[in-house]
Image (cartoon, rainbow, N blue to C red):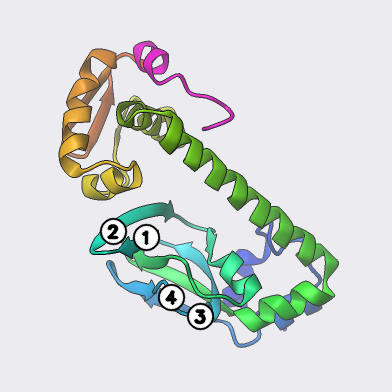
Amino acid sequence: MTTARFESIRGLPLFAEMTEESFDTLTRGAFVQNFPPNMVMISEGEVADFLHIVQSGCVELFSTWSNRETSVATLYENSTFILAATMKNRLNLMSARTLQKSRIIMIPSENVREVFATDPNFALAIVDELSRCYRATIRNMKNLKLRTSLERLANYILKQHHRQGDLLEYQLPVEKRRLASYLGMTPENLSRAFNKLKPHGVVVSGQNICITDLTALVDFAKPDLLID
């Protein structure tokens, strides 16, 4: 029988269509673990032993090279990560750490591959999830290559505006230094960029974002369905 602690993810698109028997096989040996803030859970270069699912909290995917570090993505409730490495039984290309207290479900990678081979609905869901992640990667690459740093910041502010219920005033969900890394900027350049957005309808105080002229911001950012 499927234990109650995994029922929270049963309805996620990745697991919703698989049989109950497959779900029981999938979660065999799985467990739930609580992590404190700023805890590195996985490191790049290690074998992907588990598929991770964020049950609550917030997780940052990041990578390092030659004493440099970059933020790749920020994940919230019901997000999965390290799926591609899990399926290919390869090394992690990114590290992951908690940004706040987080509850993570960890499913053995061998279970994922076993059920993938026997449950066609789960296999289709895996393909769909990997396709979604691939398209997100392409969008992010286009954002980095086709836009200036100021345009990237403007579109990030617009995206958070929509994610937070179209609020014109909200708190940044991540620290500014992590936001700078995610947008491909230095913290100093990010600070200057915030000031440059004032004529385009954005006023920043600490972590607080206030959109004073939404039309001006949209006109400058030029959001695009094929990027955003």
Question: Which residues are drawn in magenta?
Answer: 215-228
Mark 4 crowdedness (10 Å alpha carbons): few <14, some 14-19, many ≥20: few
Q: Position of residue 19 (x, y in %)?
A: 81, 71
- The relative height of residue 175 versus residue 156 in the rendered view (above or below) is below
The residue most toward the bottom is 29
Depth check: give the residue in front, 55 or 133.
133
* Separation of residues labelled 3 and 1 (CA atoms): 16 Å
Marks 1,2: beta carbons within 8 A: yes
Q: Residue at x 66, y 86 (%)?
A: 28
Q: Which residue is mark 1?
A: 62
Q: Is residue 10 left or right of residue 155?
A: right
Q: Which residue is mark 3?
A: 47
The amino acid type found where label 3 is placed reads Val
Quadrant of the snapshot with the N terminus: bottom right
Q: Quick one: SS at disc 4?
A: loop
Counting labels gives: 4
Q: Which residue is mark 2?
A: 69
- The relative height of residue 207 versus residue 199 in the rendered view (above or below) is below
Marks 3,1: beta carbons within 8 A: no
* Separation of residues labelled 3 and 2 (CA atoms): 20 Å
* Separation of residues labelled 3 and 4 (CA atoms): 7 Å
Q: Is residue 203 magenta?
A: no
Depth check: give the residue in front, 217 or 37.
217
Q: Quick one: SS at disc 3?
A: loop
